[in-house]
Image (cartoon, rainbow, N blue to C red):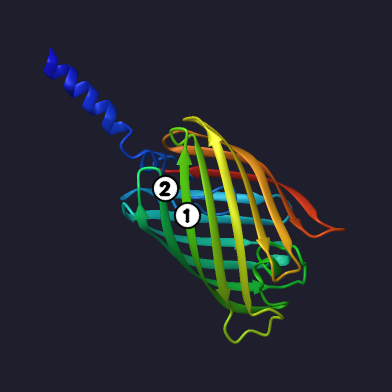
Amino acid sequence: MRAAAIIVVFVASSSHADPIGMLASSPLAERGLALGTALTVPAGDVELSGRAAVGAAGVADVATGLTATTELWVEAAIGTAADHSYALGLKQVIVHRRTWQLALEGAARHLTESDSDPYDPVGTLSFGPSNGRADAFALAAIASACADGCRALFTAGVTAAVMPASSAQSAALLYAWLDASYGGEHVRGIFELAAFPVRDGELVGVAGVRAGWRHVAFELGLGYAGTEPSPIVLPILGVAYRP
């Protein structure tokens, strides 16, 4: 009987030995509604996801866990006036602890912009060219930490991006973001805020909710972008599937 009790205690303790790793097993844990976290898709898993800022842009992603700490992803996005982009990225966890981890993420993106909408998430908001094409490269450092049994997850990140040989007004971009989410096994509330200091202090904010299970997740939120006096507010919808 004592041996059985020891086994039960060991199993229960093991399930909580890596709470942030357990959280990563949920669909879309590797990002917020719009921005990334330091979590990665688990090794061997594939995640298919899509997001839409209704009336402005749509994004489709495929991500896979190459190892327990390495995620490879591809993305296609379309915005207003047939603006579009394609991207390839790699996220690597460089420090992993029970309740926090640090990751680096690199991405290469090809942008095509057909209009000059200043708040098009696919074009100008990503410092793309006006009526042209360009390639952009970005490197991000992301830290995520959880509390209250990982019911709460907090993320801070900073991204530096460059556009070589670009005719755009700004060929470099630096932005930082914060992400906070809280919830249980199936439902989480999410809030995100990103600042673009080289773009007149432009802010992007997102708030919403995610409902998910082992293989599928759904998202509903509102996004805010721009500066006064003419910001935009758009509904955001998302869905993800892990076979």
Establish if 57 lies above or below 127: above
**Quadrant in the picture for the N terminus:** top left
Any mark on residue 164, and which? Answer: none
Query: Percent x, y for residue 92?
Result: 38, 60
Give the residue type that dot 2 points to. Answer: Trp
* SS for callout 1: strand
Q: Mark 2 points at which residue?
A: 100
Query: Percent x, y for residue 11?
Result: 24, 27
Q: Mark 1 points at which residue?
A: 143
Establish if 30 lies above or below 162: above
Query: Percent x, y for residue 194?
Result: 65, 57
Q: Which of 110 and 179 is in front in this view?
A: 179
How many dots with numbers? 2
Q: Which of 6 and 76 is in front in this view?
A: 6
Residue at (56, 73) in percent of width and height: 161
Establish if 25 lies above or below 142: above
Residue at (62, 72) in percent of width and height: 173
Instruction: Pick whichever of labels 1 and 2 is earlier in the sequence.
Output: 2
* SS for callout 2: strand
Residue at (22, 27) in percent of width and height: 10
Circle 1/circle 2 CB separation < 8 Å = yes
